[in-house]
Every structure is written in structure tokens, then in C-alpha cells.
Amino acid sequence: MASANIEKLEVEVEVQCSADKFYRMFKHDVKEIPKHLPHIIEHVEVLEGDGVNAGTVKLWKYILGKNYYT
């Protein structure tokens, strides 16, 4: 059985919307996130589940660059 390489990524982003609207985007509209954060997130895909409830598996493709490690 292969083990996963799990790492932590933290990004600070200034948004111009309410916290509730931002949370709803991450909860219900993850496929829309790359449109709003194209410099950080390239693609989000729901691999298993409905994309909202527990048990959902999502594939996140981030854009990592040296600017994020300063």
C-alpha cells in the first residue's frame, strides 16, 4: 500500500466579498475558485462524491512559485 505525501500549504489572500460568500464558494462552487484566484489555483476537480458532503474527494492543482516563500 502506497503512503500519501501530505504537506501543508497556507496562503493569505485579500478578498472583496463577505466571509459568508467566500465560504460558500469553497463549500459549494469549488470549480469556480480558479476563476477568482488564477494566480494561486489552477484547477479543482471533484473525484468522488457530490462535491459538498462528507466523503467528497477533491483534486486541487496549485500554482507554486518562489513569491509564496518570501
Image (cartoon, rainbow, N blue to C red):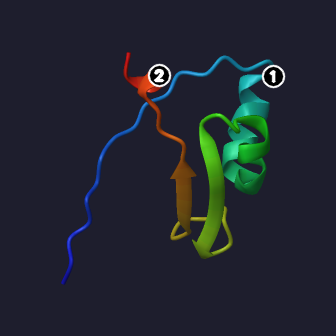
Say what amino acid the circle numbered 1 marks. Answer: Cys
Between residue 10 and residue 49, name the one nearer to us: 10
47 versus 38 height, above or below = below
Q: Identify the element where label 1 is drawn.
A: loop
The residue that disc 1 covers is 17
38 above or below 67?
A: below
Q: Residue at x 20, y 71 (%)?
A: 3
Left or right placement of residue 40 versus residue 17 in this view? left
**Occupied quadrant, residue 2:** bottom left
Q: Amino acid at mark 2?
A: Asn
* Residue at the (74%, 42%) spot, across then down: 24
Quadrant holding the N terminus: bottom left
Residue 6 image offset from top left, x and y in percent: 28, 54
* 2 or 1: mark nearer the eye: 2
Residue corresponding to mark 2: 67
Q: Position of residue 33 (x, y in %)?
A: 72, 45
